[in-house]
Image: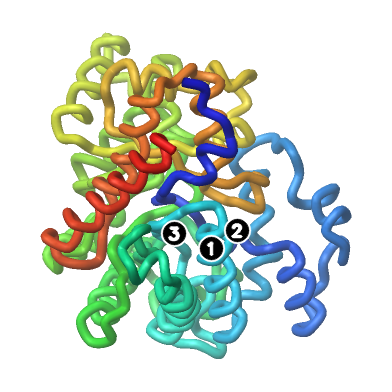
């Protein structure tokens, strides 16, 4: 059967890898910047697309520069709540029924807000959108599955004193420690904060992540934070294999116990292996792929974003997603940054279907993995029921 973009838009979907700051509505960015006195290169949507949120970027570092402007307007509770609410609504409007929004709380704490207040502000926006959506008659009647969400808190592989008031304070408090040690301490503090937020406030913080500069900032420095999360039943995902080689993916799994990998673009790239102690690079890749498959570690694939940050990918056909599918890896299609990459879940799935010639069965498997490998914030029994509702609805839409 022909799988159209319109059909995909009607299907129930998930997004397990989407950054809050990178998905802000440009109209909202402009509005909040004017209210808060934040200087932008342009105060029109088209102007921002020409100067900041471009079609292509030179590297991951160039791509990450976009986050300066959203970050500047995300320093107030009401702004965070609005941005989170609008992210959920934008997803609901294109058929996304489960969302895991991620962001780095420490980038917005230390000024007007504490870490718990940052998490609470984002949760308030997502919760409001969920409540409004789930009172619809088709949801209450059981005809369609409800909307739900989780929050993923990102620690930073690298930061400076100027990154935020919170980071300034932690750097000052540990002025005699090495940079790597400070990065690890900051991650540990974040892990402790999300454990408390979930236990005491009931905020559905479902996982910890590390993001930011990958090369030169190995995951081992964040091991204590990940083990604290692990001991408190918080799931683990890691940005890995995006701007560094397959070793980064291996380290994320073996040193941090990652349940999922964000991007994993370098997985099959033997040329990106830099460890001189690996003599047979192809053997290493083969072993790593089997290692990932055996453990059902899921890869959060972000096609458009990867094309913008990986100069070696000249055409979408070059993306390793096809090899991931051929090797029967657990994959889910995500947006990464809806605004920075000018995309939606519908767009990403349609690209995957069109470019890689996926069958209806393969599309269903992709969608199913998104729900099944989610860090659903409720009991396993509730998750099974929810996933079944979503996949039953998938079948009904396909049949119609």
Q: Is residue 387 above or below residue 290?
A: below
Q: Which mark is residue 23?
A: 2
Query: How far apart are labels 1 and 3 at the CA level?
Result: 15 Å
Q: Is residue 28 above or below residue 210?
A: below
Q: Furthest-bottom residue in view?
A: 112
Q: Say which element carries label 3.
A: strand
Write the residue at 44% across / 61% down.
Answer: 102
Q: Which callout, 3 or 2, points at the residue further toward the start of the chain?
A: 2
Q: Which mark is residue 156?
A: 3
Quadrant location, the C terminus = top left
Q: In the shown orientation, is residue 2 left or right of residue 374?
A: right
Q: In the shown orientation, is residue 322 left or right of residue 91?
A: left
Write the residue at 75% across / 83% down.
Answer: 36
Q: Is residue 188 visible?
A: yes
Q: Say which element carries label 1.
A: loop
Q: Residues within 10 Å of mark 1 (few under 14, many from 20)?
A: many
Q: Is residue 171 visible?
A: no
Write the residue at 43% across / 86% down.
Answer: 117
Q: Which mark is residue 306?
A: none
Q: Residues within 10 Å of mark 2 (few under 14, many from 20)?
A: many
CB-based contact (under 8 Å), mark 3 and mark 2: no
The picture places residue 213, in percent across and down from the top left corner, at: 50, 47
CB-based contact (under 8 Å), mark 2 and mark 1: yes
Q: Check disc 1 and report the residue beneath it.
A: 20
Foreground label between 1 and 3: 1
Query: How far apart are labels 2 and 1 at the CA level?
Result: 5 Å
Could you say which quadrant of the image residue 31 lies in?
Answer: bottom right
The picture places residue 297, in percent across and down from the top left corner, at: 23, 38
The picture places residue 85, in percent across and down from the top left corner, at: 54, 73
Could you say which quadrant of the image residue 54 lies in?
Answer: top right
Foreground label between 3 and 2: 2
């Amino acid at each position: 059967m022909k799988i159209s973009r319109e059909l995909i838009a009607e299907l129930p979907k998930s997004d397990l890898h989407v950054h809050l700051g990178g998905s802000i509505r440009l109209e909202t960015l402009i509005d909040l910047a004017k209210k808060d006195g934040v200087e932008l290169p342009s105060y029109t949507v088209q102007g921002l697309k020409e100067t900041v949120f471009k079609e292509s970027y030179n590297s991951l570092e160039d791509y990450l520069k976009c986050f300066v402007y959203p970050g500047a307007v995300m320093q107030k509770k009401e702004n965070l709540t609005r941005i989170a609410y609008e992210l959920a609504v934008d997803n609901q409007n294109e058929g996304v029924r489960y969302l895991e929004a991620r962001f780095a709380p420490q980038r917005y704490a230390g000024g007007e807000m504490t870490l718990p207040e940052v998490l609470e502000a984002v949760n308030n926006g997502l919760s409001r959108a969920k409540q409004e959506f789930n009172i619809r008659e088709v949801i209450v009647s059981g005809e369609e599955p409800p909307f739900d969400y989780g929050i993923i808190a990102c620690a930073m592989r690298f930061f400076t004193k100027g990154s935020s008031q919170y980071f300034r304070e932690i750097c000052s408090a540990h002025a005699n420690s090495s940079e790597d040690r400070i990065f690890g301490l900051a991650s540990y503090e974040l892990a402790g904060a999300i454990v408390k937020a979930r236990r005491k406030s009931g905020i559905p913080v479902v996982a910890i992540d590390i993001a930011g500069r990958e090369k030169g900032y190995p995951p081992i420095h964040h091991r204590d934070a990940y083990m604290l999360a692990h001991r408190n039943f918080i799931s683990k995902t890691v940005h890995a294999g995006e701007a560094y080689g397959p070793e980064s993916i291996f380290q994320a799994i073996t040193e941090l116990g990652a349940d999922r990998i964000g991007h994993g673009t370098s997985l099959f790239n033997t040329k990106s292996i830099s460890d001189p102690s690996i003599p047979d690079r192809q053997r290493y890749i083969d072993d790593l792929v089997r290692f990932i498959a055996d453990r059902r570690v899921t890869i959060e694939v972000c096609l458009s974003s990867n094309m913008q940050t990986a100069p070696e990918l000249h055409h979408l056909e070059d993306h390793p997603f096809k090899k991931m599918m051929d090797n029967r890896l657990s994959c889910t299609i995500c947006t990464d940054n809806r605004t920075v990459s000018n995309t939606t879940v519908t767009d990403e799935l349609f690209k995957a279907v069109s470019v890689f010639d996926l069958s209806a069965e393969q599309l269903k498997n992709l969608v199913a993995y998104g729900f099944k490998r989610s860090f659903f914030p409720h009991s396993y029994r509730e998750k099974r029921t929810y996933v079944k509702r979503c996949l039953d609805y998938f079948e009904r839409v396909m049949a119609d």
